[in-house]
Amino acid sequence: MFLLKGSMKAYDGNKRYSVHPGDYFIARKNQLIHYTKFKEDDQFEKIIITLDEAFLRRFAERHSCVSEPSDYTDSFLFIEENHFLKHYIQSLEPYYLGNLELDETFADLKREELLLILLKSQPGLANIFFNFGMPDKIDLEAFMNRNFRFNVSMERFAFLTGRSESSFKRDFQKTFGMTPGNWLKKKRLDEAYFQITQYHQRPSDVYLEVGFEDLSHFSYVFKKQFGKAPSQLAV
């Protein structure tokens, strides 16, 4: 992604990121990220090039690319501008259609050009782009305490912790002493209670941040848990 106008703030449960006009960055796959966009003069403009797995596999076969274990841990990888990258962005204009998507005829050629530029400037990125394995089995307690605010399916949580859904539920019960669904509800409600009572956040601002989808449902389960509606605690 290349940001033209506006700004972004993002949080992956571990680290916060700020993106400003002129920044280039790669958003890594298999990462959970909350982000907020801020307009400039009522505009937010960006260029996004998606490097999907099917394309990356074809590229790796053509160029005999291999990956090794990576030291990269950030969800956003910022790229330093160089003259190749600067001129690449300028070259995109003729290939964009009215809906801000690359003309399909040239899409793979322009994506290949971008990938060659990125690998030339930072060869270590090959270990990110061409790692097609599933995530390794990781510490479940640390991962869930960092990512409970993200409203994703149990299947997705299981995959990101390197487990099948059945082993995820089994390991979860051993680790936390309750089912994933019950633990997530309690954890999210406790966090909402803390944000409302200690930081005076509005319930309408909190419920999405802690992983609920619907304000009325959030208010109902909150009152059931704490005896008062969140609006009664908000000051």
Image (tube, helix red, strand yellow):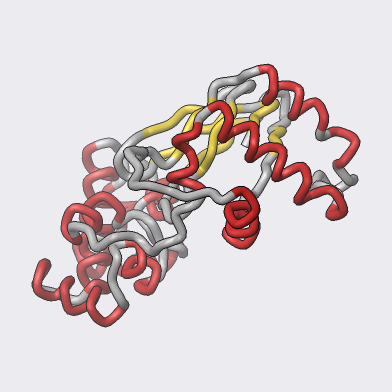
Taking depth in this image into account, of 34 and 193 the one nearest to the observer is 34
Tell me which corner region of the image, top left, top right, bottom left or bottom right, holds residue 177: bottom left
Q: Residue farthest to the top?
A: 83
Would residue 1 be found to the left or right of residue 65 on screen?
right
Residue drawn where x is 24% and y is 55% of the image: 143
Taking depth in this image into account, of 225 and 44 the one nearest to the observer is 44
Would residue 205 be found to the left or right of residue 172 on screen?
right
- Tell me residue 136's x, y (percent): 29, 60
Residue drawn where x is 56% and y is 51% of the image: 64
Tell me which corner region of the image, top left, top right, bottom left or bottom right, holds residue 217: bottom left
- Tell me residue 132's x, y (percent): 46, 60
Residue drawn where x is 38% and y is 48% of the image: 206
* 26 w.r.t. 18: above or below: below
Would residue 200 be found to the left or right of residue 105 on screen?
left
- Tell me residue 176's x, y (percent): 11, 67
Residue drawn where x is 29% and y is 65% of the image: 162
Taking depth in this image into account, of 148 and 227 the one nearest to the observer is 148
Q: Residue farthest to the bottom?
A: 166
Count every numbered label the image shows and give the total. 0
* 172 w.r.t. 136: above or below: below
Image quarter where the N terminus lies is top right
Image quarter where the C terminus lies is top left
- Tell me residue 86's x, y (percent): 71, 21
